[in-house]
Image (spheres, rainbow, N blue to C red):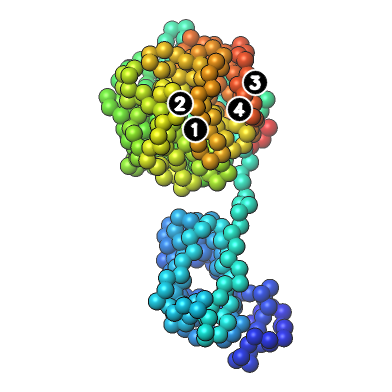
Amino acid sequence: MSGTVVSNVFRTSGVIAATAAGINFQSSVVTGTTLTAEAGNGYFINTTSNICTITLPSSAAAGDQIVFVDFARTWGTNKIVIDSNGLNFQGQDDTYTVAYSTSGVTVNIVYSGASKGWTPISDDVVTDAPVSPPTQKAIIGFGALLSNSAATGITNLVNSSGVVASDTAAVGSARTTNACTTFGGDKAIFAFGYQAGQTNNVTAISNLVNSSGVVASDTAAVGTARYGPMATGYGADLALFAFGRVSSNYNIRNLVSNQGVVASDATGAGTARYKGDAVRYGSAGQAVIAFGGRGGDANTDNVSNLVSNVGVVASDTSGVGTARIFIGAVSYGGDKGLFGYGEASGASVSMTNKISNTGVVSSDITGIAQARKSLAAAGYGGDKGIFAFGNGNSRTNLVSNSGVVASEVNAVGSTREDTTAGGFSTSA
């Protein structure tokens, strides 16, 4: 036994009990599907991969205490189930199901005697989970040059004040209509798209961007080659690419690990489409995918799909705002997003739709600077955003931390369309 010895008020066994401060927390994190718990111990339970069923001692004395901690904040995805092993739990026998399925919970139980049995003395949720620092910079990359329509792999860095740098020479295969997103908290990844000079030559290659904004050479293709996917971060430091098109639309997704490894195709949800966009919202790692097209000017969508903090894409949410394609999305305010511009009924438009911190898409806000489509968009500076380039446009628009789009400023670097952008670096 370890801990501070106190008066044996609740014990009936004659064994001296340790205080709560003396709980013997086990050094090994529990990751299995079962655990046989012992009185006086504390356990860190990691349910990232599976539900864990916990069997309590078959006999207990009043004052026996056990603590269970949600080690990875995943009980909301994979719960713990407590088997009271013949004893009562809060006055009910062990035929009753006892489960905890809220992320961030610490459960502290004490045995009170035969009548009520095991009783929680606390089962509090730790709501203020650590939040990774926001990205401070952005990178704009790839696309088709407005000067000659040639595909390119050049990039432009955006600093934490929203200033766009001149061109960085291309690394990796030139392509257009690809997608980019943040992963790992401070890095980015470009993936998929059309390869240079061949309209139907789609690819699934990717290029990682490190925390200094340096683009790596091509990583071998994983997943279905396609153009126009939507990309977003989710969870604490993960990402995904969803939807896309070749000759038809794909309803698939590819998850990206916090090391930048792209997974094979997984079945998607919602209306299959391409060239919408996606953005994070809230403080729990959620995201939303919205807008896009299904081929042809008349087949545009304004539906949205929420993405959970474990990368599950939900079914369609009824559309809000003007249905359109070739849009961009930025984060702002630390927990909200903004979809902007695009093409509706065959014409470029100037409008935005805000995303609340609960993932609700607002109605159109019109008259936002010059109409354009096929532009790049990303967050920067921790709580602001930038729209850049696009069809018929060689300028940028900064977005404030309250979601206000500023007037246009002259662009730096080669102007292009069908380009993309993502955030990187947590250092200003």
For discs 4 and 1, the disc positioned in front in the rendered view: 1
- Distance from Cα at disc 3 to Cα at disc 1: 29 Å
What amino acid does circle 3 point to?
A: Val
Name which of mark 4 and mark 1 comes first in the sequence. 1
In front here: 220 or 152? 152
Q: Which residue is identified by label 1?
A: 361
Name the residue located 51 percent from the left edge and 16 percent from the top edge.
Answer: 350
In front here: 398 or 144? 398
- Do labels 2 and 1 touch, CB within 8 Å? yes
Q: Which residue is identified by label 4?
A: 403
Label at residue 321? 2
For discs 3 and 1, the disc positioned in front in the rendered view: 1
- Do labels 4 and 2 touch, CB within 8 Å? no
Relative image position of residue 52 (x, y in whole percent): 44, 65
Asked whether residue 275 is in view, the answer is no
What amino acid does circle 2 point to?
A: Gly
- Distance from Cα at disc 2 to Cα at disc 1: 8 Å
